[in-house]
């Protein structure tokens, strides 16, 4: 197999040589440039699978080099190298299109790991590693085994779990373990797309179907043909669109908006929701026939608070991921504090907390303690205690109190409030409109 060619750019000769030697030992072919202008000349004359460049260089810095490289060939990944004290440079580089960054000082092993990920040289990992389904919990291990067994079929899957538990990761895990793994995995958030646009987003449209339809557009079902389609927040789909989705699942064909004939599709559908879909069926908010059509392979992911064994292993996993080569340990007190926390945001909240802790801790620090994890300025938002509930208070009244309290706590940020409440942004907006109609003042 031909060795991947990598261009190393750094004005410091020793650093340049050290990176080059590390990658050559790993089996790569490397070229070296001592300046941004030299790198551009070499890039124009040669073909490279990856560029690794320092950010702080005289004359032409790494940010400018990144912009010019992407203008020349936007497909070639560029990894930026920066020191701890200039982390804002790395943030800017990522905004400009850098594929990743290395934070000095980094180990040779970590350099190899990042490069392997960028050029695809690492041996093909199994789906559990690829999608970071890390667990020590017995129930989660049984669930992963169940997903592996059912992945081989084409049966529809319904994943029901709280926000932040990893529903999309579970869907990707199923896809990766299925015969469809070599085809497309396409995801669409049904709550994030306006209701009047969701049909054309899913099924596509023909040119001239409506004002502004200047050309044909393939929908998500067509894009996922032969592969897997994840319909996230399926509970937010309108009744009319539910009926059309049911027909697609039954007939294996779609009707594009403005189309004249059905188009056959071969798609495995995985649906997910953070609500009790059976309850929505009972209230008439979701079609019963569609529910049973989706719920062939039911999957329920337990919340993190019910998986205490997973908290330390996930925390260490995220510390390694965001440490970018730094060896960061978690103190015993930090583990105890995290285990005692209820994690209303589940794995997503834990990941965000660890990422923040790694970013703000000093470069010399090797251990994260409770103060690093739960910093005063970023204390977890907790829901109101049941101690204030008065006899005779209805569930509807408590729901309104909880929503208003969370909105107040988040400064009116609806996206954050919806995430903390474990509901979709559309549901929160509907609740706010309902309260305003009742005369409740909401900022």
Image (cartoon, rainbow, N blue to C red):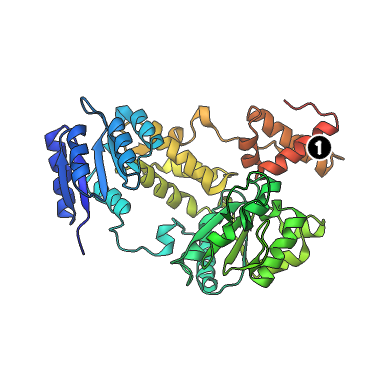
- Camera-side residue: 402 or 431? 431
Q: Quadrant of the C terminus?
A: top right
Of the pair 299 and 100, the residue shown nearer to us: 100
Nearer to the camera, 264 or 141: 264
Identified at 48% across, 40% down, the residue is: 352
- Figure check: 206 above or below 339: below
In the image, residue 249 lies at what x, y percent? 66, 68
- Does dot 1 land on a helix, a strand or a loop? helix
Quarter of the figure with the N terminus = bottom left
- Left or right: where does residue 411 sit relative to residue 169? right
Give the total number of marks visible in the rendering: 1
In this view, 88 is above or below 348:
above
Q: Would residue 244 be found to the left or right of residue 148 on screen?
A: right
Where is residue 301, by image quadrant?
Answer: bottom right
* Residue 273, picture quadrant: bottom right
- Give the percent coordinates (x, y) of residue 316: 40, 48
State whether residue 233 appears in this view. Answer: no
The one of 361 and 219 positioned closer to us in this rendering: 219
Residue at the image point whose x is 62% and y is 48% from the top:
213
The x, y position of residue 200, in whole percent, is 65, 53
* Image location of residue 360, percent across then percent down: 40, 31
* Vertical position of residue 279 compared to residue 79: above or below: below
Q: Is residue 310 visible?
A: yes
- Give the residue at x 45% y 67%: 181
Horizontal relation, residue 345 to residue 333: left or right: right
Q: Which residue is mark 1?
A: 434
């Amino acid at each position: 197999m031909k060795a991947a060619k990598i261009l190393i750019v750094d004005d410091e000769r020793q650093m340049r040589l050290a990176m080059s030697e590390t990658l050559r030992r790993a089996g790569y072919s490397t070229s070296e440039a001592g300046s941004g202008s030299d790198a551009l000349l070499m890039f124009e004359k040669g073909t490279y699978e990856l560029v690794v460049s320092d950010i702080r260089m005289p004359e032409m810095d790494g940010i400018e080099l990144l912009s010019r490289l992407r203008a020349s060939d936007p497909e070639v990944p560029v990894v930026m190298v920066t020191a701890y004290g200039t982390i804002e440079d790395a943030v800017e580089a990522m905004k400009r299109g850098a594929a990743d960054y290395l934070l000095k000082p980094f180990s040779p092993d970590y350099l190899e790991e990042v490069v392997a990920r960028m050029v695809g040289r690492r041996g093909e990992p199994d789906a559990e590693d690829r999608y970071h389904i890390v667990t020590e919990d017995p129930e989660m291990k049984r669930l992963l085994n169940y997903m592996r067994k059912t992945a081989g079929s084409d049966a529809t899957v319904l994943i029901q779990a709280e926000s932040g538990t990893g529903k999309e990761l579970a869907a990707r895990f199923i896809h990766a373990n299925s015969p469809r793994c070599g085809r497309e995995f396409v995801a669409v958030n049904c709550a994030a797309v306006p209701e009047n646009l969701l049909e054309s987003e899913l099924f596509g449209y023909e040119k001239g179907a409506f004002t502004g339809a200047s050309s044909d557009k393939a929908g998500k079902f067509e894009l996922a043909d032969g592969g897997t389609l994840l319909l996230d927040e399926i509970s937010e789909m309108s009744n009319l669109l539910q009926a059309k989705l049911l027909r697609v699942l039954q007939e294996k064909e779609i009707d594009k908006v403005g189309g004249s004939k059905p188009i056959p599709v071969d798609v495995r559908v995985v649906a997910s929701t953070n609500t009790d879909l059976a309850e929505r069926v009972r209230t008439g908010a979701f079609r019963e026939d569609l529910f049973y059509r989706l719920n062939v392979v039911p999957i329920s992911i337990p919340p993190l608070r019910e998986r205490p064994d997973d908290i330390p292993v996930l925390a260490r996993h995220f510390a390694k991921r965001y440490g970018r080569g730094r060896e960061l340990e978690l103190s015993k007190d930090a583990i105890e504090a995290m285990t005692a926390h209820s994690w209303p945001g589940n794995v997503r909240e834990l990941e965000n907390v660890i990422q923040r802790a790694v970013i703000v801790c000093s470069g010399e620090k090797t251990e994260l303690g409770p103060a690093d994890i739960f910093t005063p300025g970023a204390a977890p938002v907790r829901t109101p205690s049941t101690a204030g509930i008065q006899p005779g208070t209805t569930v509807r009244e408590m729901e309104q109190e909880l929503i208003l309290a969370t909105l107040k706590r988040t400064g009116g940020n609806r996206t954050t409030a919806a995430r903390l409440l474990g509901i979709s942004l559309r549901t929160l907006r509907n609740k706010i409109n309902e309260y305003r109609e009742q005369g409740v003042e909401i900022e």
